[in-house]
Image (tube, rainbow, N blue to C red):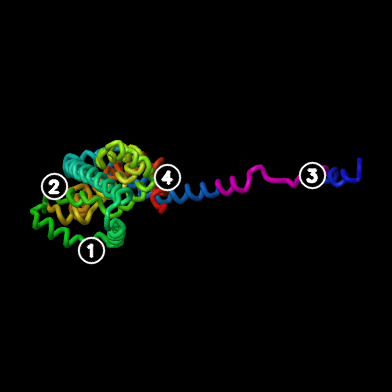
Amino acid sequence: MSTFDAPRAISLERKEPWRPHVGYHRLRAIVITVVASVLALIFVWPFLCMLGTSFNRIDVWMNPLLPIPAQFSTKLYELMVTKYQFHHYIWNSVVVVFTSTALSVLASSLAGYALAKCEFPGRNLLFMIVLSVMLLPSQTMIVSQFVVMRQLKLVNNYWGLILPAVGGGAGGIFLMRQFMLSVPTEMLEAARIDGSSEFGLFLRIVLPTMKAPVGVLATLSLQGGWNALLWPQILITDEAKMLLMPAIVRQNRLIGVDPYALPAVWAAAITGAVLPLALYAYSQKNFISAMSGAIKM
């Protein structure tokens, strides 16, 4: 062996230091997953306990800290429909929320497309106005909205809840504008040269490429409309036309007078949570990726 090969031979004979089978990054991922699971369980546990209580017989004692019913029963859900008529309120919410969501998504998509891909004077100024409106709390506009709806004779009318969604909302317009920026301009120019109208171009080219962002916006609009309380409670005072959330608040006022009032509120709240949970579970795969693309300027 030459003198030049001696250091190499010595280095090859050195033993590698012992390393654990689980690498640092994998161990960190395991710790983060365990901590996140524990925190998620802490936050979800009250909901599970309320869910278990809603399926328990009201005359049978149940540990409020455990989600397992002492005696399983669907009596509270039967009373929610037969005695308290919550199925009417759920149907009212479905009609109003789905109609307003469809109009909101359409208006926001059109406005976002115009602000992102259409050249016209004052486009940047209009976009700055939209951003300014986003900074205003929605509660500051309730009085003016109610005055307008009263003058239009839309108080105690579902159109008073649906028509404001035609504007799309500043947040929805901002999101769709950011999404539309990712659409290649060259593709739109080619369609214009072929004689396509702007609306036909929007329907045939832009919307098919925006399925995930439209789904995200629809999810956010549905969730916001479904959980809305203050504005529907102010505009709709007729009990037969109430939406689900104002009806739950009205039911809370019977607690202490009606022994089934509080359990019925639990059952109605759980029923009302099914739609938002189902929406998030369905759109979860596209939600994070679409939202991360929206915040890129």
* 4 vs 2, front mark: 4
Q: Residue at x 38, y 43 (%)?
A: 184
Relative to 148, does residue 100 appear above or below in the rendering?
A: above
Relative to 211, does residue 126 appear above or below in the rendering?
A: below
Q: Amino acid at mark 3?
A: Lys
State yes or no: discs 3 and 4 in contact (Cβ < 8 Å): no
Judging depth in this view, the residue of 101 and 57 nearest the camera is 101
- Mark 3 and mark 2 lie on one chain; the one further toward the N terminus is 3
Q: Residue at x 30, y 36 (%)?
A: 194
* Crowd rating for badge 3 (residues with CA inside 10 Å; few <14, some 14–19, many 20+): few
Where is residue 25 shown, x and y percent of the image? Answer: 59, 47
Residue with the mark numbered 1: 140
Residue with the mark numbered 2: 241
* Alpha carbon separation for disc pair 3 and 2: 79 Å
Q: Which mark is residue 289?
A: 4
Where is residue 3 shown, x and y percent of the image? Answer: 91, 45
* Alpha carbon separation for disc pair 3 and 4: 46 Å
* 3 vs 2, front mark: 3
Judging depth in this view, the residue of 178 and 267 nearest the camera is 178
Q: Amino acid at mark 4?
A: Ser
Q: Amino acid at mark 1?
A: Thr
- Mark 3 and mark 4 lie on one chain; the one further toward the N terminus is 3
- Mark 2 and mark 1 lie on one chain; the one further toward the N terminus is 1
Judging depth in this view, the residue of 250 and 160 nearest the camera is 160
Q: Which residues are magenta?
A: 12-29
| Residue lying farthest to the front in this orientation | 193
* Alpha carbon separation for disc pair 2 and 1: 25 Å
Q: Amino acid at mark 2?
A: Lys
Label 2's element?
A: helix
* Alpha carbon separation for disc pair 4 and 2: 38 Å
Label 4's element?
A: helix
